[in-house]
């Protein structure tokens, strides 16, 4: 029996999970968990990359203690953020978080040199203020000049563990610097930033065998013998691989700090409407594309929960929301004002006040406002995706931590009038492991992996309950007007 380890690091926590496949059943054991989060220094936000490395090492040590002598290892993290590496392999400067305010105006400035239309035609990537392209466009020039290599976070973690630097495609596509037509970094875009192609490692596909962990590390830290395999290193790419879908016409909602809502396609979709509605085409494993929309997801409630000093669990907040009056006040979840406000509760309240809506006061009212707004976003975007792709989605799969939120799953099923299949919560880790298992021949392909995931984990179906069509039309209109007539 082979041992597969997955390192999955999100914006708020990271885990090392040990996966095994026995008689067609996939089992997971969490062997290490740690917190993540950005550190604020003088008005800027950074990741503690050295701590992430230490935590991976600790997870590997724990695996050894549990009897793992040999294994493969895949790493996935959030996207877009990067590390500059100098000529002797040293890290240059801090690793900025994508929520750092330095990019507030970066897109506007860059669009004076290249229009978003042109960028979209090249890359098919949505405009998010923090795409790597925009981040690099405002990065300190002197640091950039010294950078021999620019590596995305998981590529850098690979590099530190193995000494090998590659640029894994699922994550590289989120830089907004890959060209859909040449299938490589776009040298003209790099030139706009004063960068060269050779500052980025060669692209590789998920499943690429990077090589063993460096011998010095194995000896110094008593690690198991571990071969690194490139997972789909973008967590969302792994999460979509881990969706237990059947057939062709299904959509996904990967629900964590972000809600990523979309479909898996064989071709990118860069129509005028897709561009105007800001849908992205991130590259997936096996030549697929994730046509999706980023929705400011559980981040909203995570921040509010912190502001109540973690006095309520997520389940308690959902319960309080259930008891609160429905659709009393709504927010446009994706407005940049909610990206990283000094106080989320206040940002929500002041938006409601400014738009003449009742101001939510209690934790239940705030949570209700967030969940109602999220469910209305999911409803709007699923219908938009169906319109743009011309396909009727028969199943919507909610995976990730948010699939545990019964209230939100049911509300989304009700508004959409569709069955929702919720679970597994661990789809990211499962997608990460699936790539390793396919790479070593234990699983044939992604269809087989999805079938294995489907019968290894509990999946709950939410059937839509009848809703008053007038109420639904009214809420959809109200929500649409908030999103499209923004007050700034
Ligand atoms: C989810 C995610 C999203 C990406 C955002 C920022 O964790 O990776 O896909 O848009 O984080 O990197």
Image: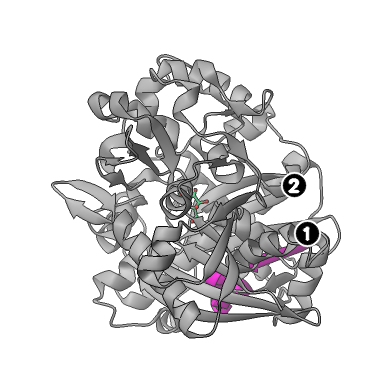
Q: Residue at x 74, y 68 (%)?
A: 244
Q: Which label number is shown at residue 446? A: 1
Q: In this view, does 287 lie to the left or right of 143?
A: right
Say whether residue 396 is magenta: yes
Q: Where is residue 31 in the image (x, y as percent from the top left)?
A: 48, 80
Q: 310 and 380: which one is in front?
A: 310
Residue stretch in magenta: 395-411
Q: Position of residue 237 (x, y in %)?
A: 61, 53
Can you say which quadrant of the picture contains the N terminus?
A: bottom right
Q: In this view, does 467 lie to the left or right of 5?
A: right
Pointer 2 with pointer 1, Cβ within 8 A: yes
Q: What element carries label 1?
A: helix
In the rendered image, the vertical position of residue 273 relative to residue 16, given as above or below: above
Q: What element carries label 2?
A: helix
Q: Mark 2 points at which residue?
A: 286
**Picture quadrant where residue 412 is located:** bottom right
Give whichever of discs 2 and 1 has the lower sequence position: 2
Can you say which quadrant of the picture contains the C terminus?
A: top left
């Amino acid at each position: 029996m082979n041992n597969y380890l997955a390192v999955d690091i999100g914006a708020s926590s990271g885990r090392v999970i040990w996966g095994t496949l026995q008689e067609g059943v996939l089992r997971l054991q969490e062997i290490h968990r740690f917190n993540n989060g950005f550190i604020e220094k003088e008005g800027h936000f950074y990741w503690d990359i050295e701590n992430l490395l230490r935590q991976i090492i600790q997870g590997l040590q724990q695996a050894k203690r549990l009897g793992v002598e040999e294994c493969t290892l895949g790493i996935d993290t959030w996207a877009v953020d990067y590390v500059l590496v100098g000529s002797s392999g040293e890290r240059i400067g801090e690793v900025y978080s994508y929520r750092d305010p330095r990019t507030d105006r970066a897109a506007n400035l860059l669009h004076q040199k290249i229009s978003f239309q042109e960028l979209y035609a090249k890359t098919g990537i949505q405009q998010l203020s923090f795409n790597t392209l925009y981040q690099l466009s405002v990065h300190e020039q002197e640091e950039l000049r010294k950078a021999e290599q620019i590596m995305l976070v998981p590529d850098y973690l690979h590099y530190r563990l193995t000494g090998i630097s590659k640029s894994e495609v699922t994550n590289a596509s989120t830089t907004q610097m890959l060209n859909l037509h040449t299938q490589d970094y776009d040298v003209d875009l790099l030139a706009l930033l004063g960068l060269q192609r050779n500052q980025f490692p060669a692209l590789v596909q998920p499943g690429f065998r990077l090589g063993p962990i460096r011998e010095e590390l194995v000896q110094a830290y008593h690690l198991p013998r571990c071969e690194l395999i490139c997972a789909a290193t973008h967590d969302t790419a792994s999460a979509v691989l881990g969706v237990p879908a059947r057939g062709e016409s299904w959509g996904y909602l990967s629900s964590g700090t972000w809600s990523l809502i979309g479909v898996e396609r064989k071709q990118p979709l860069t129509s005028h409407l897709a561009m105007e509605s800001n849908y992205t085409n991130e590259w997936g494993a096996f030549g697929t594309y994730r046509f999706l929309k980023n929705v400011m997801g559980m981040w909203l409630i995570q921040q509010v929960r912190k502001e109540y000093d973690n006095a309520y669990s997520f389940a308690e907040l959902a319960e309080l929301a259930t008891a609160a009056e429905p659709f009393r006040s709504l927010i446009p979840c994706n407005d940049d004002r909610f990206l990283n406000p000094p106080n989320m509760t206040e940002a929500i309240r002041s938006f409601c006040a400014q738009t003449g809506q009742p101001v939510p006061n209690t934790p239940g009212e705030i949570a209700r406002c967030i969940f109602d707004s999220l469910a209305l976003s999911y409803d709007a975007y699923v219908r938009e995706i169906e319109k743009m792709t011309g396909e009727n989605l028969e199943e919507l799969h909610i995976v990730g931590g948010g699939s545990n939120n019964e209230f939100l799953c049911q509300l989304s099923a009700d508004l959409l009038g569709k069955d929702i299949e919720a679970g597994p919560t661990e789809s990211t880790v499962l997608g990460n492991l699936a790539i390793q298992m396919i790479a070593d021949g234990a699983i044939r392909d992604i269809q087989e992996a999805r079938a294995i995931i489907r019968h290894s984990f509990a999946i709950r179906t939410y059937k839509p309950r009848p809703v008053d069509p007038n109420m639904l039309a009214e809420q959809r209109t109200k929500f649409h007007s908030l999103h499209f007539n923004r007050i700034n």
